[in-house]
Image (cartoon, helix red, strand yellow):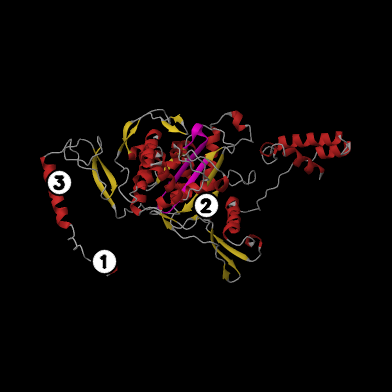
C-alpha cells in the first residue's frame, strides 16, 4: 500500500532510529514527510495523501504466536545450513531434536530482562527517552561435558532486532580473556611452567613497546599493589601484572593457547592483546572457556542440534569434528582454582556474597570506558556467559561486575535447582603446599603468615630459607632420603625399552 511504501522509504535513512518497532511516533512522522513529498510531486492526490497520513503504523511480530527462544531457533536454522545439507532447513518431514532446555531458556530470558531494567533505571532520563539507543544483552548457556547449548538470548527483544549478538556481535573481551593468558603461563607444556600460582610478579606501572610506540597499561582504578602472587593478579584483574606475565610467557605462546581453545578472531602479538584488545563473538569466548570446565577437553562441537532425522534415517553432519584435549586435567583444574578465587574474594565476589554454592569459577571482563561488560562463570555442569553493551559500541561506563555479573547470578540462582551442582574433583597431578605469603616460598615452621596453595605436582617452590630452622633441615633431609629410596632401580644401558618388547 501507499502508506507502507512511504514507511519503507522513510526508514532507509536510519533503520535503528526510524523503525516503527523502535519508535512508532518518529516512524509515523517521517512516513508522513515522505507522503507529503509524494503529494507535492503529484505522485498521489491530496485525498490519497490525507487517507494515507491518517493510516496508523502497526508492527506485526515476526515471531509466531507462542514461539519460544526465537534467537535459539534462528541459530538452529543457521547450524543446519552450516553443518548439514544446505537445503535441509527447507525440506518438509525433517525431524530435528535440539539441545534447548526450556526451563533454562526462561530463566535466562527473565534474568536478562530484569538485569537490563535494573541497569536502565539508574541511567539518565535522556537515555530512557531515546528508544533507538538501548542497552543490549547476549547470553549463552552450555553444558561443558557435551558442548550442547542449553539456552541462548541474542538480544533484549527479538521483535525489535533479530540480530543475534551471541553469534554475530564482534566485541572486545577485555579482562575476560585473561584466564587464557594465565593458562599459558601455568601449564607445563614440554618443560617447567613459566609461573606457579604462588609465583611473585610486579604490579607496578610499566611501559612497553607496541608497534614502535611506547604503551603504558593502567590498572582499572590506577592503583598498584607492588608485588603480588599470580593468583592475586588474576583475582584482582591487575592489568600491569598481567602484561608482565604475558611478556615473560611470550605473546606467540598466548596466541597459540587461544587458538587451541577455539578463539578464531584476529590476534596480533601486541601487548594489548593480553588484556583482550581484539574482537570475539560471545559464542567464541564461551567455547574458549569450555576446556577449563571440562578437564582440559574441548568438546567436538558447541551445538544447538542433537539429532536430525529424515524419514527413518539419521542425517550426519558434514565434516564432523572430534573432541580435543587442549591441556591436562591438572592444568585446567589449576586455572579453575584461580577463577574460584575470583568469585570468592576478587572482582567477581558478588557471586560468593549471593549465597551460591562455592563451586563456581568465573571471570569478569570490562573494556575501555565501559563499552563492553562481561561475566563468564561455570560449574562442572553449566557454563554461562553474559555480555552487556550498546550495539554501536558507545561507552556505558559500567564494569562487568556491575552490569553482567548480576544477570549471571540471577540466572544461576534459578538454574541451581534444576542442575544441582557438585565441586570440581581434584585430578591426579595436583599437589598442595603451605606457602609463606611474604615471599612465595614453601612455608617453614616459623613462617608467620601461611596460605595453602595448589601446584602442578613437582613445581612446588623451595623451602623458605628466611624462617627455616633446625627441625626443618632434619625433616627436609629425611624427605629427600625417603624419596631416594622410592626411586625405581635403573635399567642396564642395553635394556630393551618396555614398548618394544
Which tag is nearer the camera, tag 3 or tag 1? 1
Which residue is pictured at 35% across the width and 54% down the height? 329
The CA distance from mark 2 to mark 3 is 53 Å
Which residue is pictured at 39% across the width and 30% down the height? 206
Evaluate if marks 2 and 3 touch, with contact meaning CB atoms under 8 Å apart: no
x, y percentage for residue 220?
43, 31
Q: Which residue is mark 1?
A: 498
Which residue is pictured at 40% across the width and 37% down the height? 347
x, y percentage for residue 263?
48, 48
Residue at far front of view = 494
Mark 3 residue element: helix
Q: Which residue is mark 2?
A: 151
Which residue is pictured at 67% across the width and 50% down the height? 62
> Which region is colored magenta?
366-387
Q: Earlier in the sequence, mark 2 or mark 1?
A: 2
The CA distance from mark 2 to mark 1 is 50 Å
Mark 2 residue element: strand
Q: Residues within 10 Å of mark 3 (few under 14, many from 20)?
A: few
Q: Residues within 10 Å of mark 1 (few under 14, many from 20)?
A: few
Which tag is nearer the camera, tag 2 or tag 1? 1
Q: Which residue is mark 3?
A: 476
Q: Earlier in the sequence, mark 2 or mark 3?
A: 2
Which tag is nearer the camera, tag 2 or tag 3? 3
Whether residue 384 appears in magenta in the rendering, the answer is yes
x, y percentage for residue 368?
49, 33
Whether residue 224 appears in magenta in the rendering, the answer is no
Amino acid at each position: 500500500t501507499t502508506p507502507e511504501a512511504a514507511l519503507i522509504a522513510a526508514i532507509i535513512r536510519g533503520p535503528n532510529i526510524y523503525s516503527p518497532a523502535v519508535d512508532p511516533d518518529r516512524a509515523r512522522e517521517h512516513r508522513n514527510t515522505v507522503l507529503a513529498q509524494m503529494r507535492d510531486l503529484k505522485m498521489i492526490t491530496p485525498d490519497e495523501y490525507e487517507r494515507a497520513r491518517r493510516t496508523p503504523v502497526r508492527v506485526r511480530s515476526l515471531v509466531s504466536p507462542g514461539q519460544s527462544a526465537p534467537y535459539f531457533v534462528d541459530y538452529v536454522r543457521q547450524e543446519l545450513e552450516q553443518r548439514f545439507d544446505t537445503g535441509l532447513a527447507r525440506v518438509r518431514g525433517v525431524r530435528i531434536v535440539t539441545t534447548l532446555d526450556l526451563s533454562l531458556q526462561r530463566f535466562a530470558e527473565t534474568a536478562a530482562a530484569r538485569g537490563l531494567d535494573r541497569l536502565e533505571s539508574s541511567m539518565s532520563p535522556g537515555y530512557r527517552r531515546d528508544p533507538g539507543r538501548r542497552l543490549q544483552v547476549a547470553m549463552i548457556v552450555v553444558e561443558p561435558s557435551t558442548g550442547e547449548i542449553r539456552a541462548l538470548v541474542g538480544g533484549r527483544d527479538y521483535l525489535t532486532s533479530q540480530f543475534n549478538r551471541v553469534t554475530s556481535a564482534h566485541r572486545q573481551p577485555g579482562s575476560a580473556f585473561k584466564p587464557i593468558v594465565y593458562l599459558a603461563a601455568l601449564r607445563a607444556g614440554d618443560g617447567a611452567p613459566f609461573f606457579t600460582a604462588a609465583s611473585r610478579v610486579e604490579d607496578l606501572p610499566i611501559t612497553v613497546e607496541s608497534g614502535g610506540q611506547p604503551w603504558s597499561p593502567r590498572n582499572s582504578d590506577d592503583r598498584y599493589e607492588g608485588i603480588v602472587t599470580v593468583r592475586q593478579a588474576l583475582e584482582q584483574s591487575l592489568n600491569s601484572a598481567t602484561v608482565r606475565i604475558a611478556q615473560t610467557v611470550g605473546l606467540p605462546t598466548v596466541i597459540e593457547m587461544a587458538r587451541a581453545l577455539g578463539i578464531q578472531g584476529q590476534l596480533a602479538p601486541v601487548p594489548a592483546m593480553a588484556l583482550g584488545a581484539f574482537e570475539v563473538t560471545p559464542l567464541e569466548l564461551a567455547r574458549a572457556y569450555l576446556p577449563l570446565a571440562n578437564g582440559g577437553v574441548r568438546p567436538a562441537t558447541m551445538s544447538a542440534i542433537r539429532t536430525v532425522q529424515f524419514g527413518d534415517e539419521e542425517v550426519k553432519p558434514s565434516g564432523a569434528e572430534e573432541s580435543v584435549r587442549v591441556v591436562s586435567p591438572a592444568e585446567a583444574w589449576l586455572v579453575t582454582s584461580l577463577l574460584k578465587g575470583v568469585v570468592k574474594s576478587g572482582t567477581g565476589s558478588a557471586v560468593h556474597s549471593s549465597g551460591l554454592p562455592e563451586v563456581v569459577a568465573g571471570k569478569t571482563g570490562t573494556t575501555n570506558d565501559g563499552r563492553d561488560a562481561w561475566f563468564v562463570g561455570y560449574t562442572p555442569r553449566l557454563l554461562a556467559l553474559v555480555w552487556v553493551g550498546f550495539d554501536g559500541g558507545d561507552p556505558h561506563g559500567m564494569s562487568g561486575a556491575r552490569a553482567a555479573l548480576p544477570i549471571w547470578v540471577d540466572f544461576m540462582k534459578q538454574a541451581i535447582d534444576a542442575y544441582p551442582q557438585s565441586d570440581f574433583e581434584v585430578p591426579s597431578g595436583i599437589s598442595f603446599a603451605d606457602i609463606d605469603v611474604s615471599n612465595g616460598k614453601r612455608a617453614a615452621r616459623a613462617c608467620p603468615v601461611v596460605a595453602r596453595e595448589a601446584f602442578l605436582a613437582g613445581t612446588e617452590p623451595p623451602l623458605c630459607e628466611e624462617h627455616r630452622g633446625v627441625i626443618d633441615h632434619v625433616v627436609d633431609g629425611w624427605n629427600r632420603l625417603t624419596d631416594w629410596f622410592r626411586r625405581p632401580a635403573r635399567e642396564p644401558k642395553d635394556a630393551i625399552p618396555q614398548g618394544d618388547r
